Structure formats: C-alpha cells, structure tokens
Amino acid sequence: MSELPLPPGSTLGILGGGQLGRMLALAAARLGFDVAVLERDADSPAGRVAAHTIVGPYADPDALETLAAVAAVVTYEFENVPADSVLILQRLGVEVAPGPEALAVAQDRVAEKQFLNASGAPTVAYSSADTAEEAVAATAQMGAPVLMKTRREGYDGKGQRWVEHPADAAKAFADLGGGPVILEAPADFVRELSIIAARGRDGATAIYPLSENHHEGGILRRTLAPAHVSQALAEQAERIAARILSGLNYVGVIGIELFEMKDGRLLVNEIAPRVHNTGHWTQDGCAVDQFEQHIRAVAGWPLGPTEPHARVEMLNLLGDEVDAWAKLAHEPDTRLHLYGKRDAKPGRKMGHVNKLHPL
Ligand SMILES: Nc1ncnc2c1ncn2[C@@H]1O[C@H](COP(=O)(O)OP(=O)(O)O)[C@@H](O)[C@H]1O
Ligand SMILES: [Mg+2]
C-alpha cells in the first residue's frame, strides 16, 4: 500500500489515453505528479503529455506489471476497464480508484439500474432480455415504445434502438448484436441535467452545481452550467449524488446523468465512474476543476471547492469543427481546449470551448 496522501513527485497511473486521460494528466502534472499512461496506441492524446507511456492492451499482465512498478495509485478514464486488470493491479499492491464495485455497476446497465433503485436513486422502469424471444415478450409486457440498449459497452448513443412495436423487438435485438440487452421505458423529460461529484478517501464529498446538457445524435453538443434550477431540485440532485457515492464506497469523481421530469422529479439515466464530458465547464467555471478534483481524491488529498465563479457554455468541437481554432482563439472570454488528435473524423471529439459569462 502506498503512502497517502500521495506526495508530489510520486507517479500516478492512468488506464486509457484519450482526452479525459490527457486532461487528468495535465491536472496531475500541475500538482507535481508524474503520470504513466497505459494505452494501446503509442501516440495517444494522454500519452503525449505524460511522463511515461506503457503501450499495450489494458488486460496485458506484462503491461500492468510495468505500470505497477512505477505507479503508486492507478485510475482510469473510461469505464470499460477489464475487472481482471483491476484485480491484477491490486494483487501487485497498487491502489486502484475508483474501486471494482463502481466499475462493476457502471459496466452493466442492468446492475447499474438495480444498484440505483436499491440506493434510493430512481430510474425509468426497465427489464432485461438475453434472447430475441425474451426481448419480444418484455416489450409486449412493458408496452412499446421502449429503448433497447446493449447491457455493456455503449457510449455516445451507440448500441441503442427504439422499438415501436413488440414485433420489431427481435430485429432490434439482432441489430444490436444478439447479446444481452436492457429495455427502458421512455423518459418524457423536460431537460437533461447532470451532476459531477467527488468523494475522497476519508469519505468527504464535494458536489458541483448541476449542468444542463444538450445531445445531438447521442453525442453531447453543449453544456450550460450552473443550470438554472430551483433550490429544491439542486437539493434533490445532491441527495441522489450523496447516496450513489456512499453506496459505492466511491473514491474519485463521478458523472451522474439525470432526466428532469415534468413533475419535478429527477431520474438517474446513467453514471460514469470517471471525469465526464458534462463536467468540462468546471475547468473555467470553478477554482478546482473536475480533473484536479479527481486527482486530489485518488491521491488522498483534501477535496477542493466546487463553487462556480462564472457561468459557462461548453461546446464540443466535433470532427472538422476543430478547424475553427484560429477564429475561436480570437474570441474574448472563450477558452479553447484541444486534444491533440491527429484525425478529425466526423463526430469525433477533437476539443471543446468554454465560453465564460458573468454568474
Ligand atoms: N430511457 C430513455 N428515455 C428517453 N431518452 C433516453 C433514455 N435513455 C437514454 N436516452 C437518450 O439517449 C442519450 C444516450 O443514452 P445513454 O443511456 O446516456 O447512453 P450513452 O452511454 O451512449 O451516453 C441520453 O442522453 C438521452 O438523451
Ligand atoms: Mg449517457
């Protein structure tokens, strides 16, 4: 076990080399840490700003051993880290945060819904199916339309199909690959909100104000934060966040996606056991952003403040929208965050801007 709080000069490991890993690595470097990134791709956004890159699959025992030899604490930037990788690292004496409970819950949409409902964090009604016949029966029983999602590995709206009639469920099931699915009742929401929260090793929590999120084609386009919400709604969200954090014995930052319903209730859509795209506004809206907060939490440091000092409009730069960087760099009160990705494929997250407004 490593010394906690982890002193500056220590090395922190990150599984995953994308933009979230990059921004975590930058925050860690600012606190005096060295970062070791484990990533398949030798030329990754995170690897290019880290002290060390270990190139290999996340499940490769040799790569994990190399990581364990340099890093005292390991975290991750995406929730599909193999459970065995965490076990291997723990066996090698490395602290992994957030822990395996959070990963297990976030990797399986059914386990996630079960956990949330048991914790007093309400969700839409749902059922699950492992075969096409079960999917048809479950759709008939719930009443169409339902949203069918793969239980595992969906992101940015991928791995989802609306089913308008029970008879269409078999085709949707096949289209999604024929693996286990969840069927969700439609949430007739008025807004999508999210809350970014953190829990430290001592159980202390820090919760940022709610943000309002707009998606297009399943991909986040825009976040407005702090969202305009009533005190009652803010308190409802904080209660939900606190229950989730303690229920998972969580260490680190978590992103909790919420549906705001007409009657003022909040339902939890999903949780991400990591820093979250809807929390990027904190980089320019708060003294301690979600990335530094996550590093503080996993390194056993005290958590930082979450009060906003600006209202922020965060816009994702997708695909060739990033070509506008020179124009954006001229705009006052706009902060540009670019991920250093080489290929601007359509829909790919290449960067974001935070446009600052007075509170
Ligand atoms: N049950 C639902 N009812 C209505 N819309 C939904 C439901 N579930 C998801 N969505 C919409 O689809 C988007 C992506 O779904 P989500 O479960 O968050 O998957 P992902 O892992 O791809 O982010 C949500 O942000 C929301 O706009
Ligand atoms: Mg989502």
Image: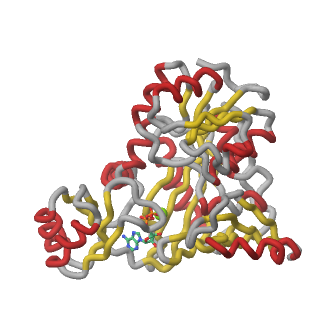
* Front in this rendered view, residue 128 or 69: 69
What's the image's color scheme? secondary structure
Q: Is residue 252 visible?
A: yes
Q: Is residue 232 visible?
A: no
Q: Is residue 224 above or below residue 75?
A: below
Judged left or right of residue 144, residue 317 is: right
Please provide percent x and percent y for residue 212: 60, 71
Please provide percent x and percent y for residue 177: 27, 61
Q: Residue visible at 75% across and 57% down? A: 283
* Front in this rendered view, residue 170 or 321: 321
Quarter in which the N terminus is drawn: top right
Q: Residue visible at 15% across and 59% down? A: 131
Q: Residue visible at 68% across and 40% down? A: 295
Q: Is residue 267 above or below residue 166?
A: above
Q: How many marks?
A: 0
* Front in this rendered view, residue 191 or 272: 272
Q: Residue visible at 47% across and 55% down? A: 271
- The image quarter containing residue 126 is bottom left
Quarter in which the C terminus is drawn: bottom right
Please provide percent x and percent y for residue 267: 43, 65
Judged left or right of residue 45, residue 80 is: left
Please provide percent x and percent y for residue 169: 19, 72
* Front in this rendered view, residue 308 or 320: 320
